[in-house]
Each structure stands twice: as structure tokens, then as C-alpha cells.
Amino acid sequence: MRNRFAICFALLAFLNPVVFGAGSGPEWTDVAEADKVLMGDYVGEWLNGPEKSYQEINPNLCSQVINIDEGVYRVKFTQDHNRRAEVYYSGEVRLEGDEIVAKDGDWDFRVTKSGLIGRGAIGGNVSEFSLKRVKLGSPTLRAKPPRGAIRLFDGSDFDEWEHTDGRKVTWTLLENGVMEINPTAANKDAEPPIGGTIITKRKFKDVRFHMEFRYPVEPGKSGQGRGNSGLFFQGVAPNGYEVQILNSYGLDGLWNELGALYKLLPPKVNAARPPMEWQTYDVTYRAPIYENGDLKQRARITVRLNGIVVQKNEEIIFQTAHKQADRAIRPPSEPLPISLQDHSNRIQFRNIWVKEL
């Protein structure tokens, strides 16, 4: 029976190599223990702040432990994770054994599996603090599609998608209902080709859209080279209107980072979660309106990243193109696909649905 099952499985794998792929790339399978237990968000408070000190009247304290490279982290302290709050302290620190230990002037702290404790100074007043690691998550994780919605990806197949050249999708379909970009950059000599941007077979204009995604750690990478992809409405990437996907955890929230309308509008707040944590995009997109061939209203978009509004009914005044010259392309008038970009990083996606408005 076992041999018969193995033969059947091998035959299915040959006939459908996407479904029975090799699994995740090393970015997901080879993760440092410290990135699993130390990296991420922390919340807590100042302890015993001096009377009338800043710490006493503003006791809340948050921190982010951000991977920079193997064994290298940046630790930031602010009052609130989901606001553009001032940064009390930001410094690069190194892993010592299985802990992060830092001593920098009035700031002295330690990050362990049990949490983050230490002391710091604001306005010359030094106070101790204690924080615990948390997962901020998103209120719309695992959101079910409403009545009348189209399931673009439910974890079982790529039937709603294709590559931009019409090929069947060559991304990896994992057993846990997740798809992972299998980038062209990692398969340069493959024949037939592997990887590349994917688009929906159906075409859309006005939509309500939900998607869940996460990016790997990728130590040593930075900027646009780390956790990069893109969600494009009414266009085949790189054309259309892009909501950026990027590992922007702990960054400034610029116009080319997570939650941005690429090179058009930065997010109102950087609501990026740490690598490896599932995040959500909930988008309401309204296509341009034409009357008798004349543009009467440009596209508008509202974007919620992890439940937080980062773009609110914004007018999209030009194409979100990388090249400045391409931003003057005339807005689309016809229904077009939704695109997910292969930008060489192994981003994972799940639970994608859309409802036409």
C-alpha cells in the first residue's frame, strides 16, 4: 500500500509540480532562534518615574527589536506603536549568546525570552522600565469573504491566476494553504521559465479587496531589497496603481515603503509588523470615471494595513510608477487585472478575496 501511495504521489507531482512543490525557500526554513523569540514588538511602562517627570505623566512605553543582520539588531523606544510618535532612543545592538545586551549612556537594557527590562533617560530624568513581547496582529486576519465575493485564493489552487505572459502560475503552493513567490531571480536558467508577476484572470474596476501576507527576515538585506512585492489595482505590474509591499518594520514609513501608494503618498503611519508575522491589506478601490472619453474623476483608494487606515479616500493623481516619465500615463478606463509582483523576494500570501462594488 505504501509503495502504491508513493507512486500515485509521484505521478501527481509530475502532473502538477506547483501543488506538490519542494516547499518554502531557505528564507523561511533557516531562521535564527533569536529572530523567533527576541525580534518584534514590546509594550510596557516606565517604573517609579521621578515626581512630575515625563515618565510619570506618560508611563506607557513601547519598543521594537528590528533585525539588521545576523546577530545585529536595532532597538527603538517610543510611546505608541501605531502613531507617528517621537523616538526616545534608537541604537544598534548585538546578540550576546541568547540575549541582547546594550549600554549606551543613560540607556541600559537587556532583551531576553522573558521580555525587555532596563533603564533610560528623558529630559535628564532616569527611570527603569519593563516590557513584554507582544504580537499586535490585525483585527481582519482570517476575515471571511462577504456574500457575493470572489475567492481569488483559498489555499487550494491557482485557478484564478496566471503569469503576465499567460503561463500557469509557477509560484509555490504550500500545504498550509499559503502561496509563496518562487522568484525568477532564483530560477534564472529554468526552462520553461519559473517565477514572475501573477495577475488575476478576471478583470476589475471598483472593488473591496482583502489579502493576507508576510515577509521573511532576510538578514543583511535592506531598503527595497528586503521583503519587496507589490499589490496593483487595475493594471498589469509595473503598470496600474501599486500599494507597496515591503519589509518596513521599524522604518520611517516613506513613499516607497509598506502602506504607501508607491512614490505617490507615504502611509499615514507605519503599521508594519515584524517579519514572519501575518499582516492584512483591506482596500477599497474606485476606478477612474470617464464620460464620453473624457476623464471626469481620477481613481480613489482607501487602504487599511493591519486594520489601521494608512490611506483615506486618496485621489491617485498619477500612475505609481518607478520611472518618473511613466507616471504621466493616461488613467485606465477599462476593467483590468489585479497583480501581485515578483520582486525577487519570497513573500507569502493567503486568504485573498475581492468583491466588486
Image: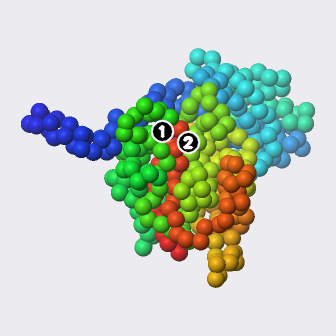
Q: Amino acid at mark 1?
A: Pro
Image location of residue 342, percent across then percent down? 52, 44
User: Can you say whether 251 is above or below 169 in the image?
Assistant: above
Image location of residue 119, percent across then percent down? 77, 29
**In the drawing, does residue 176 fall left or right of residue 206?**
left
- Judging depth in this view, the residue of 282 and 336 nearest the camera is 336
Q: Amino acid at mark 2?
A: His
Residue at 79% across, 27% down = 107
Residue at 33% across, 53% down = 156
Residue at 60% across, 36% down = 226
Instruction: Classify 10 Å Cα crowding around label 1: few (below 14), some (14-19), many (20 and above).
Output: many
| SS class, disc 2 | loop
Query: Image quarter for residue 236?
Result: bottom right
The N terminus: image quadrant:
top left
Q: Residue at the top extreme?
A: 97
Image location of residue 212, percent across then percent down? 50, 52
Residue 42 appears anywhere in the view: no
Q: Find disc 1 in the rendering and name its residue.
A: 183
Instruction: Classify 10 Å Cα crowding around label 2: few (below 14), some (14-19), many (20 and above).
Output: many
User: Can you say whether 114 is above or below 348 in the image?
Assistant: above
Residue 316 appears anywhere in the view: yes
- Judging depth in this view, the residue of 89 and 271 nearest the camera is 271
Tell me the tag on residue 3: none
- Tag 1 or tag 2, which sits nearer the N-term? 1
Q: Find disc 2 in the rendering and name its residue.
A: 343
Q: Are marks 2 and 1 in contact (CB under 8 Å)?
A: yes
- Judging depth in this view, the residue of 355 and 91 nearest the camera is 355
